[in-house]
């Protein structure tokens, strides 16, 4: 796959994302937020974690209105693949690509640790290398990861098999233990945990590797 | 023209910061506090002479950027 990783001022997981995608054999181009065009023939746009624009106003709100994001939205409208991790997930909800919002963690603390997730959707390009209900260990590092959505949106997520990951032991108060969700066409995934942080042997766990490796096969 | 936008969480949306403030007030022995909700105030100076145009424009700003209407309400006041 040919992937673009968008870099905002305050992004701090963009290079980890590049490494994980490279490791799985993908071609990656980093794109600064002030660019007005994506590189040609991009299959996947990855929006990395961090604190874009210092989390001013609301996490992800300003990044979602940056110049490159108009192009990202066009890519998504064309049916292109997109991945938002942590702050990237917050940006996708602020842009209205994914429903709901990430609120402050219920105990108002920043949480940084590996957590166990259950894989619920195993048909999307991001998750098809996992087994249904399989527990995987993926790190989280966030202060605003408490997922909230209206009951209508929650029903749509459930009915459309769009809940990709749930926390086994909910760390942040997220509605229904939701850790990651898919768009209606299952081509956009937003998740708070960082799969790129569990890809290499030196990470002590490689549960995130199948996530990137599976991006080769489209469904 | 000056305007003030007040953004508050909608009723029923949990406010962990408000809860933390309430607990701190309780630990200062203010036992009369039933609830605390924290919001945001944004002051704007606009290059507009018509009040109606100003309000319309701010409303659009609120919908597009200043508030997230999934969980927040906003109120616009011209100053």
Image (cartoon, grey):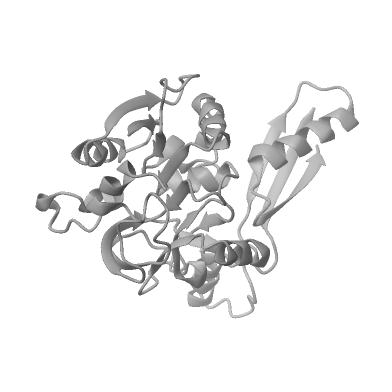
Residue A43 is left or right of residue B48, and the answer is left
Seen in the picture, residue A49 relative to A144 is either above or below; the reply is above
Q: Toward which corner of the image does residue A47 lie, by quadrant?
A: top left
Image coordinates of residue B68 in percent, x first then y, are: 64, 48
Q: Which quadrant is home to the N terminus of chain A?
A: top left
Q: Residue at x 65, y 41 (%)?
A: B66
**What is the x, y in percent for residue A53?**
45, 35
The image shows residue A124 at horizontal and vertical percentages of 42, 53
Q: Residue at x 70, y 66 (%)?
A: B11
Given residues A204 and A11, the one toward you in this image is A204
The residue under the point 59% across, 66% down is: A159
Asked whether residue A114 appears in the rendered view, the answer is: no
Residue nearer the viewer, B7 or A212: A212
Image point (82%, 30%), residue name: B54
Q: In this image, B50 relative to A173: left or right?
A: right
Question: What number of labels is visible?
Answer: 0
- Side (left or right) of B61 relative to A9: right
Q: Is residue A108 visible?
A: yes
Q: Residue furthest left?
A: A202
Q: Position of residue A217 (x, y in %)?
A: 33, 45
**Residue farthest bottom in this picture:** B31
Residue A43 as seen in the image, left or right of residue A19: right
């Amino acid at each position: 796959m040919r992937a673009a990783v968008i870099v905002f001022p305050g992004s701090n997981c963009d290079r980890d994302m590049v490494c994980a995608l490279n490791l799985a054999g993908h071609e990656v181009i980093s794109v600064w937020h002030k660019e007005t065009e994506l590189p040609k023939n991009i299959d996947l746009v990855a929006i990395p974690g961090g604190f874009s624009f210092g989390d001013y106003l609301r996490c992800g709100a300003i990044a979602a209105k940056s110049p490159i994001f108009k192009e990202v939205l066009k890519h998504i409208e064309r049916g292109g693949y997109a991945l938002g991790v942590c702050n990237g997930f917050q940006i996708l909800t602020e842009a209205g690509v994914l429903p709901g919002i990430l609120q402050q963690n219920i105990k108002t603390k920043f949480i940084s640790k590996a957590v166990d997730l259950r894989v619920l959707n195993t048909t999307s390009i991001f998750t098809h290398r996992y087994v249904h209900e399989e527990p995987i260990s993926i790190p989280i590092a966030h202060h605003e990861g408490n997922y909230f959505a209206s009951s209508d949106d929650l029903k749509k997520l459930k009915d459309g098999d769009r809940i990709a990951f749930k926390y086994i032991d909910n760390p942040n108060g997220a509605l229904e233990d939701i850790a990651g969700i898919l768009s209606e066409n299952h081509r956009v995934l937003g998740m708070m945990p960082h799969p790129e942080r569990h890809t290499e042997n030196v990470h002590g766990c490689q549960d995130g590797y199948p996530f990137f490796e599976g991006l080769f096969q489209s469904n | 023209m000056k305007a003030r936008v007040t953004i508050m969480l909608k009723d029923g949306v949990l406010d962990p910061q408000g809860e933390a403030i309430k607990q701190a007030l309780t630990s200062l022995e203010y036992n009369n506090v039933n609830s605390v909700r924290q919001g945001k105030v944004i002051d704007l100076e606009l290059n507009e002479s018509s009040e109606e145009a100003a309000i319309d424009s701010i409303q659009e700003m609120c919908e597009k950027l200043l508030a997230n209407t999934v969980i927040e309400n906003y109120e616009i006041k011209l100053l």
